[in-house]
Image: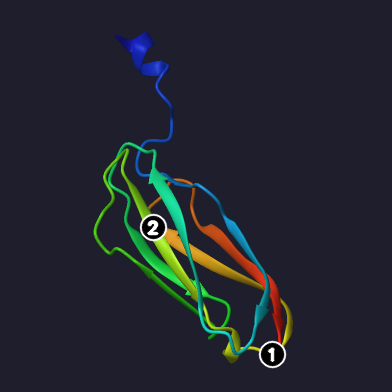
Amino acid sequence: MWAAEAKKPEAKGAHLRLEESAVDFGDVPRKGGDLVHEFTFVNDGTAPLVLTRVFTSCSCLKTSFAKRPVAPGASGVIRVTYEPHKSEPGVFNRVIQVYSNSTGGRALLTVQGNSID
């Protein structure tokens, strides 16, 4: 019985695994309306995953996510809305920090593109 326990992974608990961590919107018109992308994640850990905070690097980004725990093996979505009219024209590269009870710690999402007039 002890040998079987020794083979188990050391890290137990919730684990946030993102399907993707970046999106490139390409060339976007500044006055063309908001752009939305949904980042899908899976809790591939052994305990419920709880997203506690999601910070954006710009007022041009809004996020939404479910506040309820995500069971082991289940998935969830972090919805990101980029508002190009709130930033200057040109290339943009924005970072979103995702805090949770994941054993992996903080996760980063990136939104990039080129805002044109």
**Residue ranking furthest to the left:** 68
Q: Quadrant of residue 68?
A: bottom left
Q: Quadrant of the C terminus?
A: bottom right
Q: Which residue is mark 1?
A: 88
> Percent x, y for residue 76?
35, 53
Q: Give the class, few, some or many, for how many residues have Cα within 10 Å of label 2's Cα (few <14, many ≥20).
A: some
In the image, what residue occupies the spot 26% across and 45% down? 71
Q: Is residue 34 left or right of residue 91?
A: left
N-terminal of the pair, mark 1 or mark 2, is: 2
- What distance separates the C-alpha of mark 1 from that of mark 2? 28 Å
Secondary structure of the residue carrying tag 1 is loop
Q: Quadrant of residue 54?
A: bottom left
Q: Say if mark 1 contacts mark 2, CB within 8 Å.
A: no
Q: Give amino acid for label 2.
A: Val
> Percent x, y for residue 45?
37, 38
Q: Quadrant of residue 21?
A: bottom right
Nearest the eye: 7 or 41: 41
In the image, what residue occupies the spot 27% across and 64% down? 67
In the image, what residue occupies the spot 38% across and 57% down? 77
> Percent x, y for residue 27?
70, 74
Q: Quadrant of the N terminus?
A: top left
Q: Give amino acid for label 1.
A: Glu
Which disc is residue 77 wearing? Answer: 2
> Percent x, y for residue 38?
45, 61
Which disc is residue 80 wearing? Answer: none
Compared to residue 4, the image places residue 88 above or below, namely below
In the image, what residue occupies the spot 57% across and 82% down? 58
What sort of colour scheme is used for the picture? rainbow
Compared to residue 1, the image places residue 47 above or below, namely below
Secondary structure of the residue carrying tag 2 is strand
Nearest the eye: 91 or 56: 91
Q: Give the class, few, some or many, for how many residues have Cα within 10 Å of label 1's Cα (few <14, many ≥20).
A: few
